[in-house]
Image (cartoon, coloured by chain):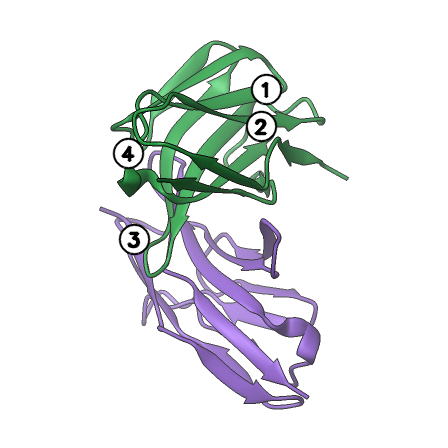
Chain colours: A green, B purple
Amino acid sequence: DVKVTQSSRYLVKRTGEKVFLECVQDMDHENMFWYRQDPGLGLRLIYFSYDVKMKEKGDIPEGYSVSREKKERFSLILESASTNQTSMYLCASRLQGENQPQHFGDGTRLSIL
Amino acid sequence: GDSVTQMEGPVTLSEEAFLTINCTYTATGYPSLFWYVQYPGEGLQLLLKATKADDKGSNKGFEATYRKETTSFHLEKGSVQVSDSAVYFCALRRSDYKLSFGAGTTVTVRA
């Protein structure tokens, strides 16, 4: 079974801090994704990486950046956290190919105070 | 842009009741359509999918048929169980190959 592991289930940070969310997958998937999940809005794509050191902005990239130095790891970075970035963050991965399913981690609930 | 709209919840029903969650889409062409499920405290899992018109996806007793005439992909289950309590997301694959998700429908099944 594919395993997508997010480093923290719950995280509390302060406004202005630099925050790192880590995601690791164990199935050699080329593509990895970061989403945020908010009530009434569903999942919205923040960033996408189609391979090592490759990244592409999603629908809501403002205030975020990403890093993919190794194939199995995809990090989401909040450069200067703000309260409107309080949310559930979900990481996903999949094999390259348009009909391949995405496999999700259990999520990180991030609170910015 | 390509998007999906799904019925708002929450939905509460009794065990063995019939469940329908409506989902309609707006897209150019005929995108692949998906239903994902999120059980409490977990990430999303793919429940079923359909890649072309008139395809029926099915899994765990759930079904959804891709209907291009009505641009719909409604999720149905004939007899729900308490273990089906979850949040259900309709999604479509956009022309840029990324997924667009609906807002999610929370379903609670009471014993």
Q: Are marks 2 and 1 in contact (CB under 8 Å)?
A: yes
Q: Residues within 10 Å of mark 4 (few under 14, many from 20)?
A: some
- The reply to whether label 2 and label 3 mark residues of one chain is no
Q: Which residue is mark 3?
A: B3
Task: Residue at 45% x, 33% y: name it.
Answer: A34
Give me the disc on residue A73.
1
* Above or below for B32 versus B66: above
The amino acid marked with disc number 4 is: Ser
Give me the disc on residue A23.
2
Pinpoint residue A12: horizontal percent, then vertical percent.
Answer: 46, 38
Ranked by sequence position, the earlier of labels 1 and 4 is 1
- The reply to whether label 2 and label 1 mark residues of one chain is yes
Residue A101 falls left or right of residue A84: right
The amino acid marked with disc number 1 is: Arg
Measured in 3D between alpha carbons, the distance from the residue under mark 2 to the one under mark 3, in whole angstroms, is 27 Å
The answer, for residue B33, to whether it is visible in the render is: yes
The amino acid marked with disc number 2 is: Cys
* Protein chain holding label 1: A
- Mark 3: secondary structure: strand
